[in-house]
């Protein structure tokens, strides 16, 4: 994410420099693309500097940067555009994951949930928010343990794919990604679900559930980002 921001700033600075020495119309690059992606070096039109040049999208089409000549103005633009996604790419991404890290992060998220909703922490507030009063002699069934475990695994797996896509490699990247996903998606959805008329205390319920997912997904993202 931070790399993308720096690349965009570099792109803008590159375009500003190119505007000051815009080449003549006759030097515009209308060279057709090849069918294979690649980067080759060449000299920028109107300048004498060696810069990388990109080839390959589809044939018989002018390069999209041809307005500025053959030059590629910045680090963001010197990479070829990604190919069309294929369904097998998802399978390859799953195979490339660190499954030990995924299982460890799943365990952390699951154990955190057990502690979070325990009577010692926020279990009583969650029950008050839901309006659940356990009857005498009530005991939780196996589904009450298996369903959260499956949900933690699916959530961790999706977060691992996001870590791979965003190329997060540090704890800071994990914290940023975890807060974005935890607050922007999980906590927001928990707040919407808490407004159901059957919940007597929607505010307390939204805070307890939303805070759990924000903290839990941040820990998951940090583990997956550091343990690549």
Image (cartoon, grey):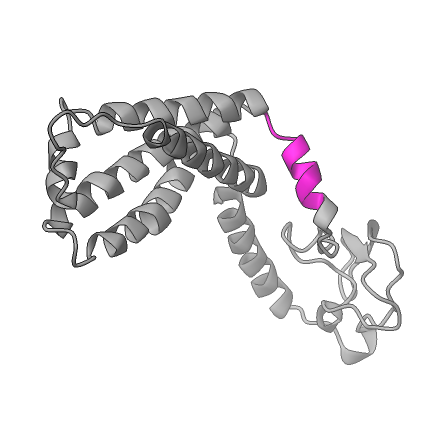
Q: What residue is shown at x 47% (from left), y 32% (from top)?
A: 153
Q: Is residue 104 left or right of residue 32?
A: left
User: Percent from the top left, x then y, of residue 214?
Assistant: 30, 39
User: Percent from the top left, x then y, of residue 101?
Assistant: 52, 23
Looking at the rendering, which quadrant does residue 108 occupy? top left
Q: What residue is shown at x 35% (from left), y 41% (from top)?
A: 179
* SS majority, magenta: helix
Q: Which residues are magenta?
A: 89-98
| Between 222 and 33, the one nearer to me in the picture | 222
Q: Is residue 161 left or right of residue 174?
A: right
Residue 95: in magenta span: yes
Q: What residue is shown at x 61% (from left), y 69% (from top)?
A: 19
Residue 219 higher or lower than 74, as above or below = above
User: Percent from the top left, x then y, of residue 54?
Assistant: 79, 56
| Between 191 and 63, the one nearer to me in the picture | 191
Q: Quadrant of the C terminus?
A: top right
Q: What residue is shown at x 30% (from left), y 34% (from top)?
A: 215
Residue 171: in magenta span: no
Question: Would residue 20 be seen by someone viewing this image from the given angle?
Answer: no
| Between 170 and 6, the one nearer to me in the picture | 170
Q: Is residue 55 left or right of residue 65?
A: right
User: Percent from the top left, x then y, of residue 142?
Assistant: 36, 26
């Amino acid at each position: 994410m931070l790399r993308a921001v720096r690349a965009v700033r570099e792109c803008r600075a590159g375009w500003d420099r190119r505007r000051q020495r815009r080449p003549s119309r006759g030097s515009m690059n209308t060279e057709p693309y090849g069918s294979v992606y690649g980067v080759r070096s060449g000299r920028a039109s109107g300048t004498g500097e060696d810069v990388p040049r990109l080839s390959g999208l589809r044939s018989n089409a002018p390069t999209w940067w041809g307005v500025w000549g053959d030059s590629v103005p910045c680090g963001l633009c010197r990479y070829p555009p990604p190919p069309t996604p294929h369904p097998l790419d998802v399978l390859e991404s799953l195979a490339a994951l660190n499954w030990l890290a995924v299982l460890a992060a799943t365990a952390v998220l699951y154990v955190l949930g057990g502690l979070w909703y325990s009577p010692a922490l926020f279990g009583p507030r969650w029950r008050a928010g839901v309006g659940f009063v356990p009857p005498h002699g009530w005991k939780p069934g196996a589904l009450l343990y298996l369903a959260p475990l499956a949900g933690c695994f699916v959530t961790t797996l999706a977060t691992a794919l996001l870590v791979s896509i965003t190329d997060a490699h540090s704890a800071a990247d994990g914290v940023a990604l975890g807060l974005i996903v935890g607050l922007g998606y999980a906590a927001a959805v928990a707040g919407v679900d808490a407004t159901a008329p059957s919940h007597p205390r929607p505010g307390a319920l939204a805070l307890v559930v939303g805070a759990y997912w924000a903290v839990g997904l941040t820990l998951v993202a940090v583990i997956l980002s550091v343990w690549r």
